[in-house]
Structures are given as structure tokens and as C-alpha cells.
Amino acid sequence: MTAATVLKDLGAMIASGGIEVVDCSGVLGPQTPLLKLPPELARNTPPIVIHKISEYDKDGPFWAWNWLELGEHSGTHFDAPHHWITGRDYADGYTDTLPVQRVVAPVNVIDCSKEAAENPDFLLTVDHVKHWEEAHGEIGAGEWVVMRTDWDRRAHDEALFLNADATGPHTPGPTAEVIDYLIGKGIVGWGSQCIGTDAGQAGGMTPPFPAHNLLHKANRYGLASLANLDKLPPKGAILIAAPLKIHRGTGSPIRALALVARG
């Protein structure tokens, strides 16, 4: 079977509905939850604002369009290596220079929804991943790995989604060791359904914010605020997570799409 035949068959399956396109993104707008950093660390992303230019009126009688105010790391978004100090030296570490071949890849979905429901500070470990691989198969080089927590069900309420108290945010995420393990596997990137790729308490880990620190040091990518991972199988889906081609962009909101076989 040739590559051309595979693509032809894929197109036919998508058109017929034999392959479902699953939307793995949340809605991007004024109500989208945004990361809140402590004031001593950094300035925060400003709220998302959608400005109307015209809508079939005196400013544009036949057309409707808007202009937007939003940060690169708003909503369901892509972290490029240049987002973090450890990835700052990669020439292909920006959203406009990265090789797009890498962002369309098989996806491994590790279901931690039960654990996250019981403990919002749940951390995924190497043992968890190895047990998952025993059940579903090895994680391969050039593949995405995403952590399913069903945290997207909280996205209607920013306070619930961020889940912060006096000790900081409490959201599930990876340990440093598991990120190292996955980088060693050759993954293209790591994704989360929470506000960022790290756990809420990751500032106190070694190194701090290990998903950001280690992924971008290795020229890998991060995905945050993913949605609908419960509609994906553990293995067998293809994830398309392409950022906007922003000049020297450190990240970008995305419309993450997964191709999933029906039946």
C-alpha cells in the first residue's frame, strides 16, 4: 500500500464519518480561565477581549469581523520551547520556525481521571506510565502523551478550574521523573487538561515547573487546557496541535483536533 493510497483512504474515512474528528479545545473568549501567577513572579496575561469591527452595519455593510486582545498562552494553547528559559536557544523553538511535521502525531492518552477526582494534587509517576504501557503498549518516539484528568469539566468556572487557595493552586500534573522518562522515549510533547502543563504545586518541585523546564530544554512541546480527552482511546488516535505562525511566538492558542476511528 502506497502513502498516496493511505491518504486517499483516510480522506474517504473522514468524509464518511468512519473516522471522527474530536475537538480537544475549549472555547476561547472573555470567560476562558487564564493562568494567575503570584505578583512576585511575573505579570499575568490580561483578560481576553473580543472587539467588534463591524457586523452588517455602517462600519461594514456586507461583512462581520472582530479584532482580539489575548495572550499567546490563553485557553487551549501550545507552549513552544522559547516559552521557557531552558529552551531559549533553539532556532526552531518559536511558533513560526518549528517543524510542523512534528505537531501531527499519534497520541497516548493516560487516564488519571479517577485519581484526580480523589486528589487534585495527584502526580503522575514513572510507575503509573509503565503500568499503562503494560496494558496498552509502548509509547513511541515522535508521539504525543497527554494526561486525562477530565479537568475540562471545571472550565465553566475559573475559580474551580484554577482550584487555588492560600497555599497556591491545586491541580494534577507530572513529576519531574516522568517527564524525563517520556523525553527519553522520544516524545514530541506532553499535554494536560489543566491551566498549564505542570501540576499546581510544581513551583516547589525540583526543578521548579519540571514539565516546562525539562520539555523545553529538550526542544519538546507542551499543550495545556485540552478538552474532551475522554472521547479518545488510550492509543490509536492522531492528534493535530498546530500553533499559529506568530513571528517569534512563544506559544499560541490552538484548535486541537484528534482523529479517532469509530467502531
Image (cartoon, rainbow, N blue to C red):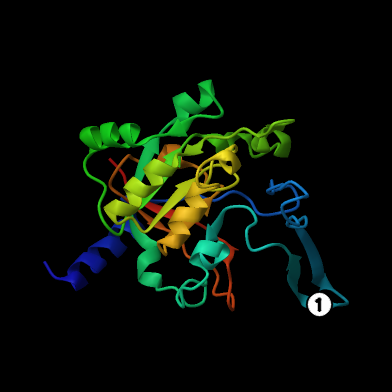
Q: Residue at x 53, y 69 (%)?
A: 88
Q: Is residue 68 above or below residue 154?
A: below
What is the residue that sits farthest to the top in this orientation? 118
Residue 30 in view, yes or no: yes
* Corner quadrant of residue 14: bottom left
Kindly identify the amino acid type of the residue bearing the numbered disc 1: Pro
Q: Nearer the viewer, residue 190 or 183?
A: 183
Most distant residue in the front direction: 206
- Dot 1 corresponds to which residue? 61
Q: Residue furthest right?
A: 58
Residue 37 relative to residue 112: left or right: right
Q: How many marks?
A: 1
Residue 10 image point, x, y percent:
27, 61
Q: Position of residue 38 (x, y in %)?
A: 74, 46
Q: Quadrant of the C terminus?
A: top left
Q: Depth check: 122 or 29 in front?
A: 122
Q: Quadrant of residue 2?
A: bottom left
